[in-house]
Image: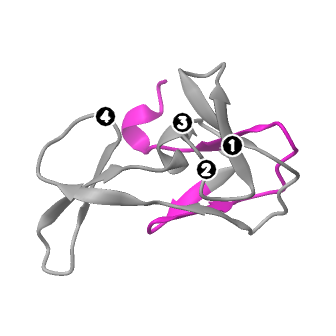
Amino acid sequence: MASTSPWCHVKESGIHGKGLFAARAIPADTLIIAIEGVTTRRDGPYVIWSDDESGSLQGLRITNAARYVNHARVPNAAFFGDELWSLRGIRRGEEITHHYGSDWDEI
């Protein structure tokens, strides 16, 4: 799968399966990638759920490289809406991680 961002690429991860990695040094507070996907009513791999403007639950199956962001207790990036931003400088070759939420704190 091609990345939709010059900042990152996908390769095998030591955390889980495939991961998203920095293709070059990424400065702090940089937009790394925006989620692209298709709406869905079915749960499954690479589906995220959020409330839409009316308060209804909306499913989105992620179709770009953003789907490979793995969890870390101390992440180097975070999603704000549908955009993944660096929380600190990320070295070239470093895996880009996000904290999935409190349900994942023990992992």
Q: Please report whichever mark, 3 or 4, sits nearer to the chain's N-terminal start.
A: 4
Q: Which residue, given by chain and number where applicable, does mark 3 sit on? A: 71
Q: Between tags 2 and 4, which lies in front? A: 2
First in residue order: circle 3 vs circle 1:
1
Residue 24 is situated, as x and y percent measured from the top left of the image, at 86, 50
Packing grade of label 2 (10 A; few <14, some 14-19, many >=20) is some
Residue type pointed to by label 3: His
Separation of marks 2 and 4 at Cα, in angstroms: 18 Å
Contact? badges 3 and 1 (CB < 8 Å): no
Is residue 93 one of those drawn in magenta? yes
Q: Are marks 3 and 2 in contact (CB under 8 Å)?
A: no
Between circles 1 and 4, the one closer to the viewer is: 1
Q: Are marks 1 and 4 in contact (CB under 8 Å)?
A: no
Q: CB of mark 2 within 8 Å of CB of mark 4?
A: no
Q: Which residues are magenta?
A: 78-107
Q: Residues within 10 Å of mark 1 (few under 14, many from 20)?
A: many
Q: CA distance from mark 3 to mark 2?
A: 19 Å
Answer left or right for 46 relative to 75: left
Tell me if 30 is positioned left or right of 102 in this view: right
Identify the amino acid type marked 1. His
Tag 1 and tag 2, C-beta contact below 8 Å: yes
Which mark is on residue 9?
A: 1
Image quarter for residue 103? Answer: top left
